[in-house]
Image: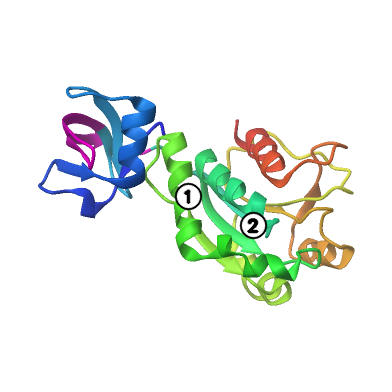
Amino acid sequence: MNLVVLFPEDFVSERSVRLEGRRKEHIANIHRIKLGDTLQVGLLGGKMGSGLVVALDKEAVEMETSLLQEPPQKLPLTLVVALPRPKALNRVIASATSLGVARIIILNAWKVEKSYWKSKRMNEANLLYQRILGLEQSRDTVLPDLSIARFFGPFVHDELSQIASQTHRLVAHPAATAPCPSSIEAPCTLIIGPEGGFIQDEVQALEKIGFSPVSIGSRTLRTETALAVLVGRLYH
């Protein structure tokens, strides 16, 4: 936890916060803080700064906060990612958040197992929690927008062009021959398919609305690894 994310309900006065549960346990047992220590803190959706520990017991930690720093800017990137297997979903959402992705859309595709949509990891509370973990990791306070596109065809035909308006349009595809561009420093809509990639009909549907298939090499990567490689190539 590189940043303690604060919520409005944590504040007991204008500057004072009281934390219990997971965050208190992490602060006490991992950071091993003591009275007078300071931590990096930030209000969800707001500014960041420091928290001075003024009280600590078995139940809670209390801090006096000073929040003067603006959060880092998001990358001008919309990530459309085919729903990965449940065990990988948490890592993908947290990683995308920590990388600074501005918008995440979870997409269905032919090779996505129907059972994945029934996973408890798809519930709203878990998707929020994974984004919070991403913020904590990267010292940020602004959540990426997150939405779900349950039906590939209607989403691609009716919504995606508007979403991708005035952005570079790229789809990572194992069979692509063109390399992923680097250091574009411009808005981009990036699509990452399921394990094994999109089927040909899906790729053609994306090409029809201006998406260019690109490759990051011959190796088959996990979704979260491919995500990190692609974002690093595009923006760093």
Q: Quick one: 162 or 4, which is closer to the camera?
A: 4
Q: Which mark is residue 80?
A: 2
Q: Is residue 2 left or right of residue 130?
A: left
Q: Amino acid type of disc 2?
A: Val
**Residue, x 70% and y 74% (percent of image)?**
157
> Which stretch did the figure color magenta?
50-71
Magenta highlight on residue 213: no
Q: Quick one: 166 or 39, which is closer to the camera?
A: 39
Q: CA distance from mark 2 to mark 1?
A: 16 Å
Position of residue 232 measured from the top left corner of the image (x, y, whole percent): 64, 34
Q: Amino acid type of disc 1?
A: Arg
**Residue, x 67% and y 43% (percent of image)?**
224
Q: Are marks 2 and 1 in contact (CB under 8 Å)?
A: no
SS state under label 1: helix
**Residue, x 45% and y 52% (percent of image)?**
129
The residue at the far left in this view is: 13
Q: Is residue 165 visible?
A: no
In the rendered view, tell whether residue 138 sits above or below residue 153: above
Magenta highlight on residue 70: yes
In the rendered view, tell whether residue 26 sits above or below residue 187: above
Local crowd at mark 1 within 10 Å, few (<14), some, or many (≥20)? many
Q: Is residue 172 left or right of residue 177?
A: left
Position of residue 15 measured from the top left corner of the image (x, y, whole percent): 13, 41
In the rendered view, tell whether residue 118 sits above or below residue 61: below
Q: Quadrant of residue 208?
A: bottom right
**Residue, x 80% and y 61% (percent of image)?**
207
Q: Is residue 60 visible?
A: yes
Location of the C terminus (image quadrant):
top right
Give the mark, 2 or 1, whose residue is nearer the N terminus: 2
Position of residue 34 measured from the top left corner of the image (x, y, whole percent): 23, 23
Tag 1 residue: 131
